[in-house]
Every structure is written in C-alpha cells, then in structure tokens.
Image (spheres, grey):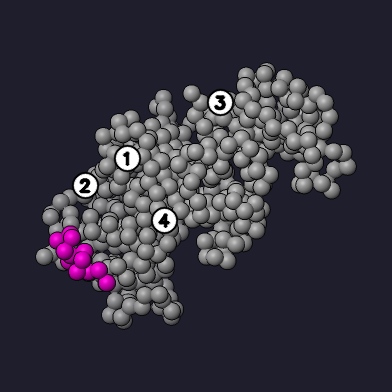
C-alpha cells in the first residue's frame, strides 16, 4: 500500500478537525482508499496554546521550511485564512511540486485565476471542496455528479451566521443587533462578524460556484454584494404578510452569454425548500437542464464538517498519486475553457421587488407612486398599506407617517432605481425607501 505524506499549515478549528480524522481514522481511510495517508508535519505560528486535539512533538513543525523542503510531503493542506500569506504558501508549494488542498474561499475567489493556471502549468492538483458550504459536497456534485448538465441557476444559503440571525428575526421577532449578539454568545458569529453580515463571505463562495459551473474566471470586484446590517423586523413581518421568508441569498444564473452573480437579502416564497433552512445550516439549490432542481443541505461550517470535506480532497489526490494519474482537470480547474466570464451589470438585473415607502398618512399617495411606476413600466402585484403608526416611526416625526409596501411583478433594476429616485425627489416620501429583491418566478 503506497504511503502519502501530508503537511498541514494552520492549526485552528478546522485544522484540529483534519488532524483528528487523519490520526483516529487512519485505518478506515486506508481500507476505503487503498492508500496509507500519514499526517507528517503540522505548522502553526504559536504552539503555546491549548488545542482541542493535541499533537505529539514529532509532528510539530517549527518553520514552514520543514514542510516546504520535505520532498516526502506530497500534499500541502492550507487552512490559514487570509489572502497574501496563503497565496505565497500555495505558490511556493506548487513550485516545489506539491499538490494543494485548501478551504480558503477568499483566496480562490480573488486569486483563483493565478493559482489554477500555475497549478495547471506545473501538473499540480488542487482540492477545494471545503471552500464552499463546509461539509456539503457541492463542489464534487457540480464537477462530477451534474457533469451532464448545463447549469441554469444556483441559489445558495452559504453563510450560517447570517442565516441564524435572519431566522431569529423571523421566528422570534428580534432586531438585528439583538440577534447578532446572541449569535456571538453562542459561538455562531465571530467577534468581528463583518465579512459575514456584509455578504462578502457568501459572495466569495458563490463566485467559486459560478466559476466552476460556467467554465471561466470572473472578476470578484464585479460581484454585486449587499449585507443584512440594515434589515428591520418590520420588513420581515410585512414580508410574512405577502407569504415570503427573508434569506441572504447567493445567486448565480447563466443567460445570453453572461453570468449574473449577486448576494443580497432576498424574499423567497414560504413554500420554497430554502425557506425551511433555519439556524446555522447551509443549503444550495442547483437547477440543471437535464436533472432539474436538486437541493444540497447540511452544516456549512464547524471543525469536523469542514474537515470532512478537506479529507475527501486529500484522499482523492492521494489515490491519484498512488495510481500514477496526472493532474486531472476534474479537480484542478474551475475553467475548462480558460475564458473570462462576463458578469451581468447590476442595472440589467430583472427580478421582482419588495419596496417599502415611508409616506404621510394622507389621501392620494398611492396614486402618485403608481403613476411614477407606470412611467417606468413597473407593474404592481400587491400593496400593503398599514393604517396605524408603526413603532419605528414614533418619536421621529410630528406628522403621522405609515409604511406603504408595494410588491412588483418582474422589473429591471434600472427602472426600479430610477422610479424610486423620482418618487423621493417629488417629496412623496419622508424617509429613505427600503428595497428588497424577491426571487419568486412568475408563471
């Protein structure tokens, strides 16, 4: 049985999980894979911590060179986080002929082009299953299980922190700050949750899925990203009245030679399977032209679920090394055609919209709004106008103001933004208008 040596860089939550599985399930992995996989060295900047899974001194590396310069180590597992340091680490590992396994979604979303092209030139394999949705095998599903399909669209709940917060707001009526604080106390949110709540984390993940699904590189800076920081319980409650649940949705759609990639708070119908995904769980809905809709659900983060995905890549690459198989396009490349994806401009998005205006409680307001909408070819599907003063408006204005909510039929982003700009310029509203996109396909 061929022995494959592993070097692990980064010994945080996921790194501890990877070491635990490799050490405690060594015999099981060998039995299932036909390869002996040995964790030879682990490097972290500080060994003076109490780790959940302690390692013997013989496996502790005091410098990166102990891993990089060891010709017996065939696979480097990068679990450090960030971009610049892991980018240098992976680049040097590739130069030294070592295959790569990483869970670093930010790195792949922002520097994937450089990494994958270099790996291809050097005949190096890269495993990145753990970079998206933790223990959910969505990368393998898109790469292999759905290989016969042209991917029509992907809808994903790809961040457990934001999903927990929105679930608490929906089910318990909590405001954003209270729900966030609770998530932090329970360990579901970082002390600095910025990249989660502003949508960047989910955007990194959908960028990777879009590249894999549509066969090309994309410019991450062009991905539309909007977080949940400004979501108010009032909109969640009014959305309920319309039959919707609010989720931070990561969306990728291919059409007319372009790819639409965006992340933002989104209302979805309460009978949509994704609407039932609560708490810290993740889920991805994929529609292929042959298979139709498939949903993948599970734990999107955590030590052992993410480590499970890392191990699957280690085993896959180890088997290929043992069998003498080369790089293998199926695991290394996110861009079979080496092309640059053209992303749809935000102004060209077409979807439905939930719009909450804050208006004086006087006659004629709805007629004025409807007239502006008509000029911009925006069709109204439903209206909610509350008679009572809503609590968020109390003590803020002397006059009586109320929320006016309009649900539109499918419209262009450009027309929506221009219509709202005109409505606000006319002085019809007294507060900034709230816009939430709706993914509810009309028959």
Residue beneath label 1, please? 335
Residue 267: % across, % down: 56, 39
Q: Nearer the viewer, residue 129 or 296?
A: 296
Mark 1 crowdedness (10 Å alpha carbons): few <14, some 14-19, many ≥20: many
- Which residue range is magenta in the image? 23-37
Residue beneath label 3, please? 410
Residue beneath label 4, please? 299
Which is more N-terminal, label 2 or label 3? Answer: 2
Which is more N-terminal, label 4 or label 3? Answer: 4
Tell me the element at label 4: strand
- Residue 115 lies left or right of residue 262; in this view the side is left
Residue 352: % across, % down: 57, 30
CA separation, marks 3 and 1?
Answer: 32 Å
Which is more N-terminal, label 2 or label 1? Answer: 2
Instruction: Answer above or below: position of 115 versus 25.
Output: above
Which is more N-terminal, label 1 or label 3? Answer: 1
Mark 2 crowdedness (10 Å alpha carbons): few <14, some 14-19, many ≥20: some
Q: Which of the 4 image quarters holds residue 218?
A: top left
Residue beneath label 2, please? 328
Instruction: Answer above or below: position of 30 versus 428.
Output: below
Tell me the element at label 1: loop
Majority SS type along the magenta span: helix
């Amino acid at each position: 049985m061929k022995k494959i040596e592993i070097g692990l860089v980064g010994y945080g939550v996921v790194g501890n999980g990877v070491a635990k599985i490799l050490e405690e399930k060594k015999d099981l992995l060998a039995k299932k894979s036909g390869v002996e996989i040995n964790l030879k060295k682990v490097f972290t900047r500080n060994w003076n911590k109490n780790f959940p899974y302690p390692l013997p001194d013989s496996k502790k590396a005091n410098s990166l060179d102990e891993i990089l310069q060891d010709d017996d180590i065939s696979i480097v597992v990068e679990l450090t986080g960030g971009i610049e340091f892991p980018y240098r680490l992976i680049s040097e590992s590739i130069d030294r002929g070592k295959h790569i396994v990483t869970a670093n979604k930010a790195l792949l979303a922002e520097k994937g082009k450089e990494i994958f092209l270099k790996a291809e030139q050097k005949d190096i394999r890269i495993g990145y299953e753990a970079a998206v949705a933790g223990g959910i095998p969505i990368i393998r599903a898109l790469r292999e299980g759905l290989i016969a399909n042209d991917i029509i669209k992907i809808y994903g709940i790809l961040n457990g922190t934001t999903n927990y917060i929105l679930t608490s707001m929906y089910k318990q009526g909590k405001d954003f700050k209270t729900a966030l604080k609770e998530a932090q106390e329970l360990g579901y949110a970082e002390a600095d949750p910025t990249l989660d709540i502003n949508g960047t984390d989910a955007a990194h993940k959908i960028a990777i899925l879009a590249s894999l699904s549509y066969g090309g590189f994309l410019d991450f800076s062009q991905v539309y990203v909007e977080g949940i920081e400004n979501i108010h319980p009032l909109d969640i409650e009014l959305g309920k009245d319309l039959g919707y649940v609010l989720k931070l949705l990561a969306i990728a759609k291919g059409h007319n030679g372009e790819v639409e990639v965006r992340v933002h708070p989104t209302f979805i119908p309460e009978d949509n399977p994704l609407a039932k995904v609560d708490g810290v769980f993740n889920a991805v809905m994929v529609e292929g032209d042959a298979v139709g809709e498939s949903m993948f659900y599970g734990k999107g983060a955590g030590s052992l679920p993410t480590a499970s995905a890392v191990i699957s890549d280690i085993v896959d690459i180890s088997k290929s090394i043992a069998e003498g198989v080369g790089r293998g396009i199926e695991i290394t490349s996110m861009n079979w055609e080496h092309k640059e994806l053209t992303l749809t401009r935000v102004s060209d998005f077409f979807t439905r919209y939930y719009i909450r205006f804050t208006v004086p409680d006087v006659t004629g307001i709805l007629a004025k709004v409807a007239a502006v909408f008509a000029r911009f070819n925006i069709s109204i599907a439903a209206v909610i106008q509350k008679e009572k003063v809503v609590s968020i408006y109390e003590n803020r204005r002397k006059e009586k103001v109320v929320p006016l909510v309009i649900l539109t039929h499918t419209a262009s982003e450009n027309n929506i933004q221009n219509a709202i700009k005109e409505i606000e310029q006319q002085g019809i509203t007294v507060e900034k208008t709230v816009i939430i996109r709706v993914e509810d396909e009309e028959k």
